[in-house]
Structure formats: structure tokens, C-alpha cells
Amino acid sequence: MTPRRLDLAQRLNALGAIVSALVIAGAWYFEFSTHEAPCPFCLMIRICFTGIAIGALLNVRFGVKVAHYGLCLLFAVVGMVIAFYDVVSSYPPLGSWGSTPFMGLHLPTWGFISFAGAAALLGLVMFWEGQFRGEPMAARAAETSSLWRLVYYVAFGLIAVITAGNVIIGYTVCGASLTCAA
């Protein structure tokens, strides 16, 4: 079986999934380095970043489709709403948030900025109609370079580890209940 070819859009989606995983890893770094437990909103924000990464990996694995971008955009908008609510409901942030500021802003504010940027980028990427045309994935038989296969597997592995870690952290913070009063 010859490995399939990853086109430019799929390569960019693999990199986007890695960036999304690194954003969550950055939140983990701040959480563990400052010994702060994530709030329920932070956990929901992480779920939204994971959803964006999963949509991007669907584009890599099954070919670029509007539905996959739609999934990414849905999670970006939901994440933006959650982050915005977290920022607004905790105002003024200096005395009410437990998170340590990074470059003068708290993590939910950075989450809002990241989701807004992701939504804008997804909107722009969807204007690129050439990525939706072409041969079906089964007809693409040119060999993929080992570097891009590695990037895909790294992205998939990072998202798997991040998701498992978020489940463990969520269970530690909230327990087995569907409501969390951290």
C-alpha cells in the first residue's frame, strides 16, 4: 500500500492541530508551575481547543471538507463565548481570578484572543476553494514525505495525550459528576 499524499491544506491542518495542542500544553504548564487548579470554564475552554484540533485532524485523515472546517469553526465560536463569559464574569480580574497573568493578561483573555484569531483564520481559509476540488483521497497515490507523516502522527499523538490528560485533570477537579464546583 502506497502512502497517500498530503496536500498543502492538509499539512496546514496538521500544523494547526499541533498549535492547538501546544496552547493546551501551555495552560498545563502554567497550571502545574503555579500550583493552580483549572476552573470549570478553563476545562471547557480546553475542550474547545481539542475540538478545533480534532476537526483539523479530520481534514488531514479524511481529506479537506467544509464539514471539518465547520466543526473547527463551531468549537472556535463556542470557545470564544465561554472565554468571553469567563472574562466578563470575573471582572475586575486582578482580585478575583486565581490565574497568574501572562504578558499582562489572564489565561481566559488569551483564550478569547486565540479563539477569535482561529475563527477569523478559519473564515479566511474557507475562501480558498481550490482545497475542496481535486481528486478523491483514494486516487491520490503519490508518496508522502516521511517528515509530513511524522507531523501528522505527532499531531495525533499530542491530541490523544492532551485529551487523556484533560480527562484526568477534569476528574481530579470535578469528580465523576456532570457539574463542577471547583
Image (cartoon, rainbow, N blue to C red):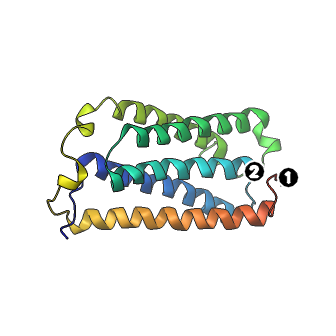
104 sits to left or right of 123: right
From the viewer's side, name the closer residue of 22 and 69: 69
Q: Residue at x 22, y 37 (%)?
A: 133
Where is residue 163 drawn, in percent x and y?
58, 62
From the viewer's side, name the closer residue of 95 and 149: 149
Q: Residues within 10 Å of mark 2 (few under 14, many from 20)?
A: some
Q: Give the structural element (helix, strand or loop) at label 2.
A: helix
Q: Give the structural element (helix, strand or loop) at label 1.
A: loop
Instruction: State if disc 1 and disc 2 touch (CB < 8 Å).
Output: yes
Where is residue 68 drawn, in percent x and y?
42, 43
Q: Quadrant of the N terminus?
A: bottom left
**Mark 2 to mark 1: distance in Å?**
8 Å
Where is residue 181 drawn, in percent x and y?
85, 52
Q: Residue at x 82, y 43 (%)?
A: 96
Q: Can residue 168 be seen by looking at this rendering?
A: yes
Residue type, mark 2 in image: Pro
Using the rendered view, name the quadrant where residue 84 is placed: top right
Q: Residues within 10 Å of mark 1 (few under 14, many from 20)?
A: few
Read off the residue under disc 1.
Answer: 181
173 sits to left or right of 112: right
Closer to the chain start, of discs 2 and 1, is 2
Q: Residue at x 80, y 59 (%)?
A: 174
Read off the residue under disc 2.
Answer: 40
Instruction: Looking at this view, name the residue that lies furthest to the left.
Output: 142
Q: Residue at x 66, y 39 (%)?
A: 83
Where is residue 131 drawn, in percent x and y?
26, 39
Residue type, mark 1 in image: Ala
**151 relative to 125, above or below:** below
In the rendered structure, find residue 118 and report the number of the disc placed on it.
none
Number of numbered discs? 2
